[in-house]
Image (cartoon, rainbow, N blue to C red):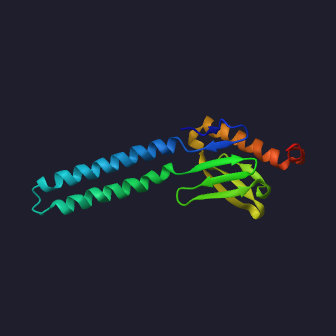
């Protein structure tokens, strides 16, 4: 439930906390609103015939919208001496080896941390968000320590 340094030495894991809470709450509100609308709609005096299939459709639409909102809970990050595995709102994990990374950044006016690759290509770390405050600071410290260790030739020879 946190964006912190993992219990395993040399491993950093993260996931968004604040946006996860907001996403879950938003999904519940939307789902409840659609279900209430589906249940109350046949009892209105608007003159429109609403049958069971319509009610199921409205409830199903609410479920689809709620699942879309839950996409805010998907970002994850795992980093160790080999590199960084990151997952965005959609899709699977993407692995980036430390030898490809030129910098680990979290600029002050940006919402998400990022890895800088050669040619100024950016890999956005959606699991490390400004809104998570101290959790994100701990993750960035861990990521920067792993990045520094990977860049240090003495760290590889001690192996």
Q: Residue at x 37, y 57 (%)?
A: 65
Toward the viewer: 127 or 5? 5
Q: Is residue 111 visible?
A: no
Q: Position of residue 62 (x, y in %)?
A: 32, 55
Q: Quadrant of residue 41?
A: bottom left
In the rendered image, residue 54, in percent from the top left (x then y), is placed at 20, 62
Is residue 54 shown left or right of residue 116? left
Looking at the image, is 7 positioned above or below residue 112? Answer: above
How many numbered marks are there?
A: 0
Could you tell me which residue is drawn at 71 percent across and 57 percent down? 96
86 versus 20 height, above or below? below
Q: Is residue 53 left or right of residue 122?
A: left
Residue 133 position (above or below residue 70): above
Q: Which residue is pictured at 84% across the width and 49% down the height?
A: 151
Quarter of the picture holding the C terminus: top right
Left or right, residue 96 beside residue 24: right
Residue 57, image x, y percentages: 25, 61
On the picture, is 17 further left or further right than 10?
A: left
Identify the residue shown where x is 12% and y is 53%: 43
Is residue 122 in view?
yes
């Amino acid at each position: 439930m946190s964006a912190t340094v993992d219990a395993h030495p040399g491993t950093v894991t993260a996931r968004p906390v604040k946006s996860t809470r907001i996403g879950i709450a938003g999904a519940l509100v939307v789902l409840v609103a659609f279900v209430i609308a589906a249940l109350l709609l046949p009892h209105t005096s608007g003159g429109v015939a609403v049958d069971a299939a319509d009610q199921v459709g409205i409830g199903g639409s609410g479920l689809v919208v709620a699942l879309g909102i839950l996409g805010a809970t998907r970002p994850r990050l795992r980093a160790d001496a080999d590199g960084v595995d990151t997952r965005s709102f959609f899709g699977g994990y993407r692995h980036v080896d430390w030898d490809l990374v030129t910098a680990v950044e979290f600029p002050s006016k940006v919402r998400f941390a990022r890895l800088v690759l050669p040619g100024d290509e950016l890999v956005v770390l959606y699991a490390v968000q400004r809104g998570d405050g101290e959790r994100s600071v701990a993750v960035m410290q861990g990521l920067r320590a792993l990045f520094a260790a990977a860049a240090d030739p003495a760290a590889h020879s001690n192996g």
